[in-house]
Image (spheres, rainbow, N blue to C red):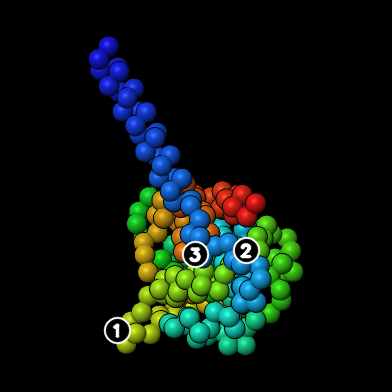
């Protein structure tokens, strides 16, 4: 009986602690978000749900350029779509079962995928689920700096280009951080968005659908 009560008490404490963590990590940073609608320097970024499993962040290259200190490619692009993922899986021409298992259960090296866009994101990704998120200028800078810090640098302080990307005008770059089931492309996107002050939890963003759900709920 005593052991049963002890286990029950531990379970309640665990649930309460988890709730506090999830709630705390979903709090708005009031000094950054939401943006003051009367200001003229607010910025819009876009989160795209690609293929139903991967999210990418799209931002204005012109707005982001002053804060992307490690990254100066695609100067003629209007927008940049940026995603993070497992080095082998993300760059593979053909996905195998072993690649999926390796990416999920082994900490692996990561890459960033950058695509140059000319069209408005909502038009370019008309067949995908896209959320347009308005940020304060300070929040936008914080987000871009997060992305900038995700690029791995060589001994000369330069980004490491790995090769052509998946579609259009795009490239892969060596990234910081290791990829695994609990630190995947969607948790990276959530961390980036959270750096802007937007209230999103990164503790259970395993799927792109959950990422999009949290964004839409947080904007209400």
Is there CB contact under 8 Å for labels 1 and 3?
no
Q: Give me the residue at 37% from left, 69% from top.
A: 176
- Between residue 82 and residue 87, name the one nearer to us: 82
Is disc 1 surrounded by few (<14), some (14 to 19) or many (20+) residues within 10 Å? few
Q: Would you say residue 180 is visible in this rendering?
A: yes
- Between residue 46 and residue 109, name the one nearer to us: 46
Q: Give me the residue at 30% from left, 18% from top.
A: 5
Q: Position of residue 81 (x, y in %)?
A: 58, 71
Q: Nearer the viewer, mark 3 or mark 2?
A: 3
Q: Which residue is mark 2?
A: 133
Is disc 2 surrounded by few (<14), some (14 to 19) or many (20+) residues within 10 Å? some
Does residue 21 appear to the left or right of 91 in the view shown? left
Label 3, label 2: how far apart the Cα atoms are: 17 Å
Q: Secondary structure at mark 2?
A: strand
Residue 155 numbered mark, or none: 1
Label 1 vs 3, first from the N-terminus: 3
Q: Give me the residue at 44% from left, 83% from top.
A: 69
Q: Quadrant of residue 38?
A: bottom right
Note whether 195 is above or below 158 in the view shown.
Answer: above
């Amino acid at each position: 009986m005593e052991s049963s009560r002890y286990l029950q008490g531990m379970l309640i404490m665990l649930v309460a602690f988890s709730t506090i963590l999830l709630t705390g990590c979903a709090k708005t940073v009031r000094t950054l978000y939401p943006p003051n609608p009367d200001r003229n320097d607010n910025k819009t970024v876009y989160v795209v749900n690609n293929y139903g499993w991967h999210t990418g962040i799209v931002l204005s290259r012109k707005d982001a350029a002053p804060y992307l200190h490690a990254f100066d490619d695609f100067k003629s692009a209007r927008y940049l779509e940026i995603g993070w993922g497992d080095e082998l899986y993300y760059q593979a021409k053909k996905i195998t079962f072993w690649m999926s298992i390796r990416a999920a259960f082994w900490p692996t090296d990561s890459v960033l995928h950058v695509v140059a866009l000319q069209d408005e994101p909502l038009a370019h990704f008309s067949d995908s689920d896209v959320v347009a998120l308005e940020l304060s200028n300070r929040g936008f800078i914080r987000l871009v700096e997060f992305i900038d810090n995700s690029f791995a640098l060589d001994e000369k302080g330069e980004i490491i280009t790995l090769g052509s990307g998946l579609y259009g005008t795009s490239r892969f770059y060596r990234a910081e951080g290791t990829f695994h089931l609990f630190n995947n492309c969607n948790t990276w996107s959530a961390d980036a968005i959270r750096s802007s002050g937007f209230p999103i939890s990164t503790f259970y963003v395993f799927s792109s659908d959950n990422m999009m759900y949290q964004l839409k709920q947080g904007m209400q």
